[in-house]
């Protein structure tokens, strides 16, 4: 597996899947190892996926300074990867919390971004978190699912801070709660660095006014991709990101959840693949 050194000497790893032009893929979680992407629903058949394991996750080393897990400080790791790859500019796909990392990167290094796809990305970097109300409204759309009656009270309690995360609520994050989704969810705990995740969004990670102002000058095409059934972000929240960049397009995957490549691989691969092919 390919390895490179970050600015502070931390040894970072990425994984390659597929053939063709490279597409740098930034994971969410936050701080979940890139293994959860698989081949992104078959996107590896169209692009060579460069799946970065963020520091302290997957096969990447643990840094000496835990403060470097903060989202804004991870921007330097993405830039180190670009330099290592020898690319003047690069295409980037970012999922979930990784979307804020990508937005911070694009704001700091706009000239280094060829195209950017933000997949079900909550825009913390722009000061727009997903609210409990938005999440509950999306959850109510699943009222006809057989698991809803048991899951909804636990979901509401978790969002209100009145209960711990209960695995019974996990189906809300998937458009289809089938065997594929269940296997994907079962790997979450092992793949995620929880202590690093606590630092990712910590104080100082974001500067929404500065990021929003910088993105106004971004010339690279941006795809904002939402899932119809996702609550974080809802399509309405995701759509607001497109207002910050001049060259944005917006797409909602019918029935899609937070991991849309699992819900409808063919639709996901076609839409995202076509975007990166221009």
Image: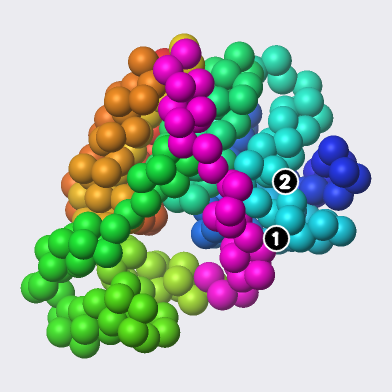
Secondary structure under the numbered disc 2 in the rendered image = strand
Tags 2 and 1 in contact by the CB under 8 Å rule?
A: no
Work out whether residue 18 can be spotted.
no
Taking depth in this image into account, of 169 and 73 the one nearest to the observer is 73
Q: Is residue 17 left or right of residue 241?
A: right
Q: Give the residue displayed 42% in from the left and 17% down from the top.
A: 216
Count neighbours of disc 1 (C-alpha within 10 A) and say few if under 14, some if 14 to 19, many if 20 or more.
Answer: many
Residue at left offset 56%, top offset 50%: 27
How far is disc 2 from disc 1 in space, using C-alphas?
Answer: 11 Å
Quickly name the residue at label 2.
14
Q: Is residue 212 above or below residue 173?
A: above
Q: Main secondary structure of the magenta part?
A: helix
Question: In this view of the protein, which residue sits in the foreground, 94 or 72?
Answer: 72
Q: For the magenta stretch, what is the residue range?
A: 188-217
Residue 96 image label = none
Q: Which residue is mark 1?
A: 57
The location of residue 155, given as percent across then percent down, is 28, 77
- Magenta stretch holds residue 102: no
- Residue 144, compared with residue 8, is above or below; it is below
Whether 204 is among the magenta residues is yes
């Amino acid at each position: 597996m390919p390895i490179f050194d970050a600015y502070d000497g931390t040894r970072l790893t990425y994984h390659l899947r597929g053939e063709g032009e490279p597409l740098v893929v930034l994971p969410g979680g936050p701080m979940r190892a890139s293994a959860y992407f698989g081949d992104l629903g078959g996107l590896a058949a169209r692009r060579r996926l460069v799946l970065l394991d963020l520091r302290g996750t997957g096969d990447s080393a643990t840094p000496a300074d835990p403060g470097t897990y903060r989202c804004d400080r991870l921007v330097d790791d993405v830039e180190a990867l670009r330099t290592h790859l020898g690319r003047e500019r690069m295409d980037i796909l970012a999922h979930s919390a990784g979307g804020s990392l990508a937005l911070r990167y694009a704001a700091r290094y706009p000239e280094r971004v060829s195209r950017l796809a933000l997949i079900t990305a909550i825009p913390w970097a722009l000061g727009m978190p997903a609210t409990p109300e938005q999440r509950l409204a999306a959850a109510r759309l699943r009222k006809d699912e057989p698991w809803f009656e048991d899951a909804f009270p636990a979901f509401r309690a978790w969002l209100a801070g009145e209960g711990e995360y209960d695995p019974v609520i996990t189906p809300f994050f998937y458009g289809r709660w089938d065997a594929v989704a269940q296997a994907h969810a079962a790997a979450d705990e092992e793949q995620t660095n929880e202590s690093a995740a606590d630092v990712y969004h910590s104080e100082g990670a974001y500067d929404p006014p500065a990021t929003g102002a910088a993105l106004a000058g971004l010339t690279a095409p941006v795809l904002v991709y939402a899932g119809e059934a996702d609550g974080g972000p809802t399509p309405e929240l995701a759509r607001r990101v497109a207002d910050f960049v001049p060259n944005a397009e917006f797409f909602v995957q019918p029935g899609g959840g937070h991991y849309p490549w699992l819900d409808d691989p063919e639709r996901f691969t076609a839409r995202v693949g076509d975007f990166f092919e221009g």
